[in-house]
Image (tube, helix red, strand yellow):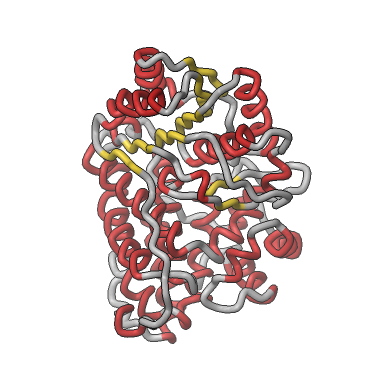
Amino acid sequence: MWDAAVDVHEVKEIRAKVTAYLGVGAIGKMDDIAAALKAKGVAKALCVTGGRSYKLTGAWDHVQAACAKHGIDLVLYDKVTPNPTTDSIDEATKLGREAGVQAVIAIGGGSPIDAGKSAAILLANPGKTGEQLYTGEFAPESALPIVAINLTHGTGSEMNRFAVATVTSLDYKPVIAFDCIYPLFSIDDPALMTKLSANQTRYVSVDAVNHVIEAATAVTANPLSILLAKETIRLVAKYLPKALENPEDLRARYCLAYAAMMAGTAFDNGLLHFTHALEHPLSAVKPDLAHGLGLAMIVPAVVETCYPAKAQVLAEILEPIVPGLAGAPDEAHKAAKGLEQWLASVGVPQKLTDGGFTENDIERLCDLAEQTPSLGLLLSVAPVKATRAAIETIYRNSLKPMI
């Protein structure tokens, strides 16, 4: 067990900072949120979202009605794509600045929420661009107030201080993390998630599993990130098949949304390492690659690499999907193969070759993992040293299914 091995003299920081509303009908809390924004002097807000789901789910109707009731004018930017870019963040910021907005409401999955967080920073820091933000040219201390209305159960962005975007001119997909972009409020309403396609349901849930595998095994892991990890995996293992069988199953969606919230809190505390650092080059080079699918392709090889250093923790948290692990370092391949088999059982058997990657891409991917701003920080907290050889091995072992 992790508690027998923890260094009690190492001081850990515990974070839990967002006021979140979880449950069927939670979108109704938008009325209270709009009132709170108005009390803070907000008269105009920028709504950042994608092209369709904000309307199809009915979330937009609730936001419009609540803001109209409390005298808040809305400016809509609905052009965020999966794997958002700094170009779209700049467009949203320009729209919000011209309108004089004082808050940002993000509606959607991780992409719109991350884009909204980024725009909130730029709106509070005139003269700065998305590329400057994501290449580390400045470190913001302020952002406009953010409300996150989450429409997927995976990203965790509604619960933490992280955001991701692609700098298209460089094929960079960095991560930012600033205290100023914790949402003031977030909403996780399972009823808004029932229209997710089967693949979206799979990929976002796999994202949550990856979050906790990394957050529990990073050198920065703390007791909370480890505690949340096993429960997250337990819930995904139990309820992902139910959501795939019946997309309208509100209990399944609720439990997956709660799992994703926990996972977002877990990596806010424990941070991320190999899997996310090595996936970002994949979806930077191939923007159509779903983030969760890219993670699924490489996480078994990551577990195999990290298992000897974190065998007891991984054996414990993976138990719901890879039962029977004893926590011995020599189980690394068994654990990785078991995880790969579980992924296949929920409909995600793909490897890098299925995504169009070959041996010829590995050198470029290694370069991007080492050169992309911020990814070095993730790699620095991996439980084993993130040498170029280790990174190359993970990519190479992820090209095809394990033997």
Relative to residue 156, is residue 360 drawn left or right?
right
Report the front residue among 16 and 88.
16
Residue 375, x across and y down, in percent? 64, 60
> Image height check: is 362 above or below 157?
below
- Split into 4 quadrants, where in the image is the N terminus? bottom left
Residue lying farthest left? 251
Image quarter of residue 90 = top right
Q: Is residue 388 left or right of residue 83?
A: right
At 61% from the left edge and 51% from the top edge, which residue is drawn? 355
Q: Residue furthest right?
A: 169
Question: Against 253, is 98 above or below?
Answer: above
Please provide percent x and percent y for residue 265. 39, 54
Residue, x 73% and y 44% (percent of image)? 132
Residue 99: image location, x then y, percent: 60, 18
Observer-nearest of 58 and 297: 58
> For residue 252, what is the image quadrant?
top left
Residue sitting at x 45%, y 52%? 207
Residue sitting at x 35%, y 18%: 66
How many marks on residues? 0
- Does any portion of residue 309 appear in the rendered image? yes
Percent coordinates x, y for residue 397 in the rendering: 59, 69
Q: Nearer the viewer, residue 12 or 339?
A: 12
Q: Is residue 300 above or below residue 49?
A: below
Residue 360 visible in the displayed image: no
Relative to residue 98, is residue 301 drawn left or right? left
